Image (cartoon, rainbow, N blue to C red):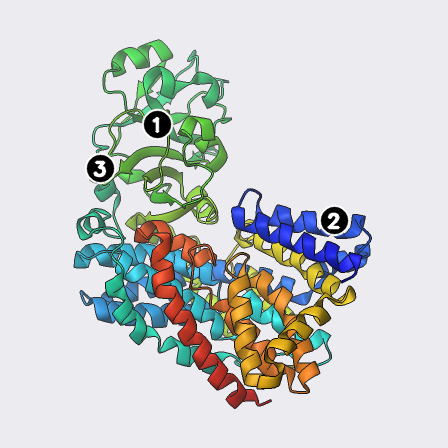
Amino acid sequence: MNRELLWVLSLLLIAILLFSNNKLRMDVVALLVIIAFVLSGTLTLSEALVGFSDPNVILIAALFVIGEGLVRTGVAYQVGEWLIRAAGSSEIKMLVLLMLTVAALGAFMSSTGVVAIFIPVVLGVSAKMKTSPGRLMMPLSFAGLISGMMTLVATPPNMVVSSELVRDGNHGFGFFSVTPIGVVVLLGIAYMLVARFWLSGVDPEAAKKEGWKRKTFRDLIRDYKLTGRARRLAILPGSPFIGHRLDDLRLRQRYGANVVGIERWRKFRRVMVSVAGNTELRLNDVLLIDMLASEVDLREFCTSQRLEPMVLRGEYFSEQARDVGMAEVSLIPDSELIGKTLYEVGFRSRYGLSVVGIRRNGEAMDWLLADEPLQLGDILLVIGDWSMIRQLQSQKHVMLVLNLSAEVDDVAPAVSQAPHALFCLALMVAMMLTDEIPNAIAALIACLLMGKFRCIDIESAYRAIHWPSLISIVGMMPFALALQQTGGVTLIVNGLMDIAGGAGPQVMLVCLFVLCATIGLFISNTATAVLMAPIAIAAAKQMGVSPYPFALIVAIAASAAFITPVSSPVNTLVLGPGGYRFGDFVKVGVPFTVLVMIVSVIMVPWLYGF
């Protein structure tokens, strides 16, 4: 083993350790890897940055945008509503339809996004059936992972492996190359029908308390005890509020008054202004205030601050539902907000929304919230501009939007453009199937058409892209090149040949699957595919067989991240809402992974042949 290879393997081990302990963000680790390769002289600058020019990186980014277009036009939510109607109160029917629907949607949009959309659906159905969400949450996440085996564009590992095939001088995978295996694996629904009995998660009563998905303003007002707290106050001349920022006024600390919205005159009409800590108040502004401190004398407060009470129709801003939205959000298990107070986080300044209620252990807290440390399992009720709530849906690395109030249907940003969004999706798939237009170009055309049809705006498009995922892919790509140049791929392939070379290519497929599944316990499935694809292709060459079965087994194994809650983001998303422990994933995931391996090792040679 030469010195350069030892350095590359050491750097790989360090990266795996950093990825697994979550001390640093994955994109930061990826950038550190690029810097280390260049400064050490292992790779040139252009070699270290090769990932930024990879067409699959562009394709993955474009697919994030297309998935967001389906969300903004209401297509994804309408599918969820149909699922609720079709399943009724049958848990078996719900599980079957849920897994089929998620696998189908995930074939064309981010599986993480699909799972995030369906978590509120599962919570709602569980509440209706008075059963534990834990019996459906893991089938949901497993269906999201299976969706990666449905089409070429369903998950980044498929595209990474296909790109490696092309780089080696072969044809890449076709759009439906992995579909037959995905369809057979989806028959694992039968396994999940049995495995759901091993999953208890939270108890049914807790599930019942989680509430129905499509709660209205009035439902949320009742659940969070907001009745009688809303005020609508106009700023009069001479008010000490004029010209000051909200943070400087400290209204929550002094009066228990939380400004959740501002009505302001612009061009002869009154508009709703998003509220942040640095929002400066003006003469004639009308403040929508959540007055939590009941002991404050409203008349004295208005007199001393030169404010005029205005008519407030409806209960707690329900009449302003087209401008002011409500949503319930939950912190993800490794959220940076856990243990911090809303004041320490600067929640309103950071997200442009106000937290007006917190439910802990199923009960609404009725005291001042700003200084209350947030705990895992808390459900926060946020209120503010609908556009800011939409932005909050992209903060999946911090929190998950569980429920949007029913009034969102009246203010969906592009609900009338749903047919255009479906047309763009169908056109993209059709262009990819022709093999005449590169996949990345087909996806970019679909993105531009979605913009043209106003399915998505440019700001939402950039927010939809999960940049940490892209950067982590870019940062792991130099590893494959460095292992090839320093002899690491040859060393690993020789080791595999010593173990299984004499037993035939089918045993080698088993070894590759096990190796991928093991590496995937510590790093992301995409990073696993980046590392393993060149090894699999080199092993095929050394055995004198076709590289396609070996490459395909790597793509499938990378998607089979069922064993731990940290193996894939979709598992992490359901960990909290499902009430799972680490061992629940091991208990259900290990047998299912073995099942997927058996199916793959049998079917892959049959499809492609050695």
Identify the mark at residue 363; answer none if there is no mark: 3
For the residues labelled 2 and 3, the Cα–Cα distance comes to 50 Å
- Image vertical order of residue 348 relative to residue 121, above or below: above
Q: Nearer the viewer, residue 187 or 63?
A: 187
Badge nearest the viewer, 1 or 2:
2
Residue at 54% across, 84% down: 506
- Quarter holding the C terminus is bottom right
| Amino acid marked by disc 3 | Glu
CA distance for labels 1 and 2: 42 Å
SS label for mark 2: helix
Q: Which amino acid is tagged 1?
A: Glu
Q: Is residue 24 visible?
A: yes
For mark 3, give the secondary structure.
strand
In the picture, the disc for residue 36 is: 2
Q: Amino acid at mark 2?
A: Ala
Q: Residue at x 42, y 18 (%)?
A: 250
In contact (CB < 8 Å): disc 1 and disc 2: no
Instruction: Return the residue nearer the eye: 444 or 232.
Output: 444
Q: Residue 71 in the image: x percent, y percent? A: 43, 58
Residue 372 - label? 1
Residue 178, numbered circle: none
User: Is tag 1's residue or tag 3's residue first in the polypeptide sequence?
Assistant: 3
Few, some or many C-alpha atoms within 10 Å of disc 3 (few <14, some 14-19, many ≥20)? few
- Nearer the N terminus, badge 2 or badge 3? 2
Q: Residues within 10 Å of mark 1 (few under 14, many from 20)?
A: some
Q: Quarter holding the N terminus?
A: bottom right
